[in-house]
Image (cartoon, helix red, strand yellow):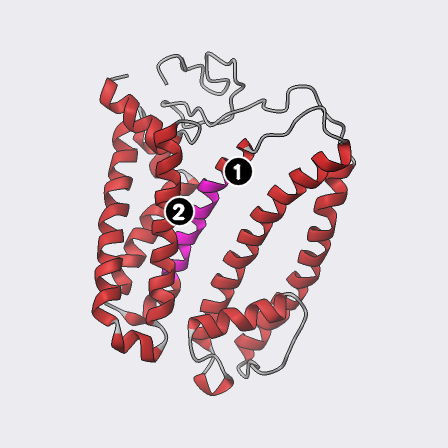
Amino acid sequence: MKVWKLKLHQVLNEADTKSGLVYEYVLFTAILLAVASVALESIESVGKKYCQILIIVQGIILVGFVIEYVLRIIIIDQPSKFIFSFYGIIDLVAILALSSVMYNDHLYFLVVIRSLRFLRVFKVLKYIQFRTESKAILIALKQSRTKIIIFVFAFLLLCTCFGTIMFLIEPKESGFTSIPMSIYWCIVTLTTVGYGDITPTTIPGKFIASLIMLIGYGIIAVSALIVTSEASKQIAAGEHESNTQTCSHCLNSEHKDEARYCHKCGNSLEDV
């Protein structure tokens, strides 16, 4: 593997390197700005006042996303592995969505797909250190804390997606005046609080609201099980069994610390 490709590979795919970790947080910030800028633009007063600034921010982020997408194709031995992977498809659709939003304000909902890239940053969280001599309950609580953080991000992502959909299908008279207000309604509904200050009036809106309510019960159950499932696990010797070392041939990232070859395709990891 060429030196420049190796360095790019480490930056883009390996969060256990210093440059890779910095890149992950830069990417995280860019995704957050992309989603936030579109959400803010949907607020009529903000959209009118800061329209040009928001468009410039979206344009800069779009250029960055395009460059990143192209670089990811260049550094892998089999480009199709990335292009047709989950993140590859999400990246492409999100780039098209963000560029479309800049010219068509009816396509706001497509940009939330980009927020799925938050999942790529979650791998950084697994490097939180746990000492084997700690008490079992403390380890369980710490591990649960990490999962809860991931769970909260997934919850917010779900609310963003459903909230944007409700903003598109419900009339403003129902209270869905902006994406942030719709996300607020979704959070209230998913947590089964139900203030009733915003209520869907269309049949599709009521159907989605019913679906969200059912999902809400599942979310409550999952959050309760996170800690209990961790508490039931035995403390295994050697907790750091994997890292973010990624195969440059097939993009597999599940490798043991001492691994020399990719267990999926057999490609050497020595140069990665």
Task: Report the side of 61 relative to 10 (left or right).
Answer: left
Vertical placement of residue 44 versus 68, above or below: below
**How far across and how far down the image is residue 135, in percent?**
76, 31
Dot 2 amino acid type? Phe
Between 147 and 102, the one nearer to me in the picture = 147
* Residue 115 in magenta stretch: yes
How crowded pointer 1 is (Cα within 10 Å; few <14, some 14-19, many 20+) is rated as few
**How far across and how far down the image is residue 258, in percent?**
52, 13
**How far across and how far down the image is residue 157, in percent?**
50, 57
Quadrant of the snapshot with the N terminus: top left
Indicate which disc residue 198 carries. none
Between 196 and 26, the one nearer to me in the picture = 26
The residue tagged 2 is 28
Give the residues drawn in magenta, as a range: 110-123
Secondary element type, mark 1:
helix
The answer to whether one can see residue 81 in this image is: no
Which residue of the protein is positioned furthest toward the right in this rendering? 232
Dot 1 amino acid type? Leu
Instruction: State how far apart marks 2 and 1 are (Cα).
Output: 13 Å
Quadrant of the snapshot with the C terminus: top left
Q: Main secondary structure of the magenta part?
A: helix
Indicate which disc residue 125 carries. 1
